[in-house]
Image (cartoon, helix red, strand yellow):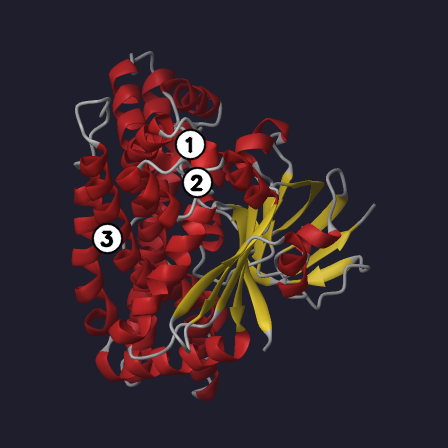
Amino acid sequence: MSFVKVWSKRHSLRLGENWSFGPLQFEHIFNVKFPNQFIGYKDGFGTGFLDNEMLQQCYTKVIAEIYRMGFEEYFEKRALPVFESFLDFSKTIPVKMQKQLSSQEIFNIWKDFINREDEWMNYVWMVFLLDDGLTKEIKKKLEEIQFSEIERLLPAMVAPEKKTAAYKLKKELLRLAALLEAGEVIDRDLEEITRTYGYFSILNMDESPLEIDYFRNEVEKLVSMNPSHALKSMEEDEAGIEDLYREVREKLALHPDILRLVEACKKVAYYREYRNDLRQETYYYARHLYAEIAERSVLSSGDLIFATRKEIEEFLSDNKKINKDFLLQRKTLSAVISDYNIGLVSYEFDSEKVIELWPEEDVATDVKEFRGITAFAGKVTGTAKVIFDVTKQADDFEEGDILIATTTNLSFIPLMSKAAAIVTDEGGLLTHTAIIARELKKVAIVGCKVATKILKDGDSIEVDANVGIVKVLS
């Protein structure tokens, strides 16, 4: 069995469970088995692998269904109600439970949250999987019909169908910067932005939302960058992408099957971002539930996120103590392993066995040049900063550094805004990194596989996204 790495980030066992137990329903929903998974943890940092053969079978089946049914029927109509109900339920979780709720009532809320999260995860995985397979299929079909303007029109084909939350936030910050530049008072606007977008920093249940001082600082930095001009430029870019997409539709009018793929691609680009927004906003509310369970079990939230579902269930239903030493050991080295051929999710907490089972990555690291997929063209030279954990490393990142990461999520946006360029191990043209890089107009290369293994903090590097190559200069 050959595994391929698909993500690596600060992660937790509770997320690993959701990402593993959720796909037990995947075949029932989408009529194809989800690829077997291995999610490993080293020092609180998670890495996810998928069975490569099953992954390719999944691509083939899913794309065939999109040709047959269209993305709206195959995914969108079923996914949206699940997405919306998961967020709506999370908003009902009490902020301060204290002792007015019994352990049984807490258990009922927790169980309902977990069940809804598992259902939602199937649809999240679908748009995650479609990134690479869908963009490759579109390029292949365009080459088959000898479509001569792929590079010029591709930005319109992979642009999100709707504006992402990150894009809306950037426009709001520029608007406030223009007001501040004109001498206006923006305190109430900052409070509203904090309420609306504070969840951007939350992926795990032990993380805290962004506060008003963060947004105030971002606005103040933008004042010196001619915010009115930047706003106008964003609006012109929006109009330009719309014009290009109209051109795409005209040129592909005689190829409805390819046009259907392009429309799916634009929807996937949006839903990949929307599912991140939804995840982090949902966890913004759900973190109160985990904080309450942590307090009752005399643990920190940072420890509790490495407890299993069964341990939390037994604590709430039978007051069975959760062993803190076990949780700390799991942070150091552990794994969640899924076999969807037999419908089984299991754990491995024995360190030696985890090391033995950990998939090997067949990548060369003794090179000074490597290639990836251009997400936004341009050429930049600068200093590499390798960021694995934003919560611990954000202060080390300076304006103009080149961001090197395995992948990115909403919590990376402040660093992406400061970066001269962005390089990631994972992803394709529809990933968070690619979408945000295009919106921020940041030179970016994704899907390099080896960036975080080859590059070190302080390396002088050249990122040439015109040809998709990263070079180590010194």
Residue 103 image-quadrant placement: top left
Q: Mark 3 sits on what residue?
A: 116
Q: Residue at x 42, y 35 (%)?
A: 201
Q: Mark 2 sits on what residue?
A: 305
The percent coordinates of residue 349 (x first, y second) are 56, 52
- Which numbered dot is residue 19? none
The percent coordinates of residue 372 (x first, y second) are 62, 63
The percent coordinates of residue 269 (x first, y second) are 36, 59
Q: Secondary structure at mark 3?
A: helix
Looking at the image, can residue 252 be seen? no
- Which numbered dot is residue 301? 1
Q: Is residue 281 left or right of residue 376?
A: left
Disc 1 and disc 3 in contact, CB within 8 angstroms:
no
Of the residues under marks 2 and 3, which one precedes in the sequence? 3
Residue type pointed to by label 3: Arg
User: Looking at the image, is 355 positioned above or below residue 276?
Assistant: below
Residue type pointed to by label 2: Ile
Q: Viewer-nearest of labels 1 and 3? A: 1
Disc 2 and disc 1 in contact, CB within 8 angstroms:
yes
